[in-house]
Image (cartoon, rainbow, N blue to C red):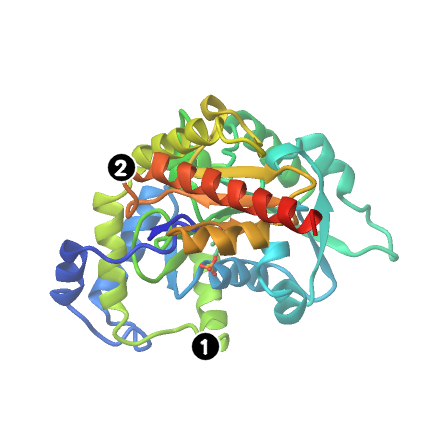
Amino acid sequence: MIDLRSDTVTQPSEAMKRAMHSAPLGDDVLGDDPTVKALEAHIAEMLGKEAAVFTPSGTMANQLAIRSVCEAGDEIIAHRDSHVIHYETGAPAALSGCMIAPLDGPGGIFSDLEMAAAVRGPDDHNAVDRMVIVENTHNRGGGTAWSLDQFKAVSEAAHHQGLHVHVDGARLFNAVTASDYSASEFIAPADSVSVCFSKGLGAPVGSALIGSRKLVDRSRRFRKMFGGTMRQSGMLAAAAIYALEHHVDRLGDDHQNARALARALSGVPRIHLELTAEKIPSNMVFFNLEEPGPTAADFCSRLEEHGVRMIPMGLRRVRAVTHLDVAAEAMPMAAEACAVVLEELQIMAGGSDAG
Ligand SMILES: *Cc1c(COP(=O)(O)O)cnc(C)c1O
């Protein structure tokens, strides 16, 4: 099976399992798991911030930032296609009583002017804008990486309005790989950032929220409240440390594979790539199926029978994500399977037309 549904499908390698197996452990609820502490110090240092807290998921890391900074009735500004709107179960409303003002913009990116225009003034009618969230890379936007200049402009405008700048950096290291900035350079203007160790970095579980000591200390109370404080979690933190040490530098391979997949798909009839191979920013390939024709859901379920998995991200929109458990050789094979499936579905549709 060539599994391109997400970069979360990776299995921990033998070496990663050995690191987990030999990690010194304690009870992190009581604050004495040395491996969790080491991970938190390591990721905070990598990003040039004071502190970090280890969480079970990226959703929790984002929600801790929101809960720690906002109060009920506050508003968060984020791109319309952002993860926090689409895939976090309405948690800003449920857990923090916040609403979100959605912004437009190609590829999940918006400008400082668009952001500033969304901020409501000081009037008793208005929700209080408290936070802006920038997603880098932007998942539904196509794996897009923000430019440093645009992010600096947005951060400056946000700070000018008194907003907290949170980066949803589930794939921050993919953004760094795709760009000419380092992780700490990009994060410098931000007040907080979440990163996932279980995406392209290949750890089985875990994310972190990183920011000032004050913010992180406050978020620990909410992590406990949300049920996310874990005991001998050093076993998981060890996998994350291993991932940071061994799997960051290789992310470029995934980006190359995504471009190779796009190149192979560009020759397949009835598939319309959103971006040409040279323009694929990171490890994601999005394409649309021609209309009339199968839906993305029908296409993906049939594709699975041919040993390839991708996911529907809209009526006719399909996403494929490369990661450390798929090899370069799999790219032309995956594209070939797409061609075969579309051919079969075309013949079936033609057959039913004929009666
Ligand atoms: C995956 C992801 C998250 C966190 O997801 P979890 O499954 O909760 O770890 C957050 N933001 C983005 C952009 C993501 O892709």
Residue under label 1: 227
Q: Is mark 1 within 8 Å of ligand 1?
A: no
Residue 70 x/y as whole percent: 63, 60
Residue 338 x/y as whole percent: 47, 41
Horizontally, residue 345 falls left or right of residue 308, namely right
Q: Is residue 295 above or below residue 186?
A: below
Residue 26 x/y as whole percent: 21, 74
Farthest-out residue, front: 355
**Distance in Å between CA atoms under marks 1 and 2:** 34 Å
Q: Residues within 10 Å of mark 1 (few under 14, many from 20)?
A: few
Q: Which mark is residue 212?
A: none
Q: Residues within 10 Å of mark 2 (few under 14, many from 20)?
A: some
Horizontally, residue 151 falls left or right of residue 53, namely right
Q: Is residue 287 above or below residue 29?
A: above
Q: Residue at x 65, y 40 (%)?
A: 158
234 or 202: nearer the eye? Answer: 202
Q: Which mark is residue 250?
A: 2
Residue 142 seen: no
Location of residue 34 by image quarter: bottom left
Q: Residue at x 30, y 52 (%)?
A: 202
332 or 146: nearer the eye? Answer: 332
Residue 279 x/y as whole percent: 49, 24
Q: Is residue 155 above or below residue 41?
A: above
Count of labels in the image: 2
Q: Is residue 265 above or below residue 99?
A: above
Q: Nearer the viewer, mark 1 or mark 2?
A: 2
N-terminal of the pair, mark 1 or mark 2, is: 1
Q: Residue at x 63, y 48 (%)?
A: 351
Dot 2 amino acid type: Arg
Dot 1 amino acid type: Gly
Residue 244 seen: yes
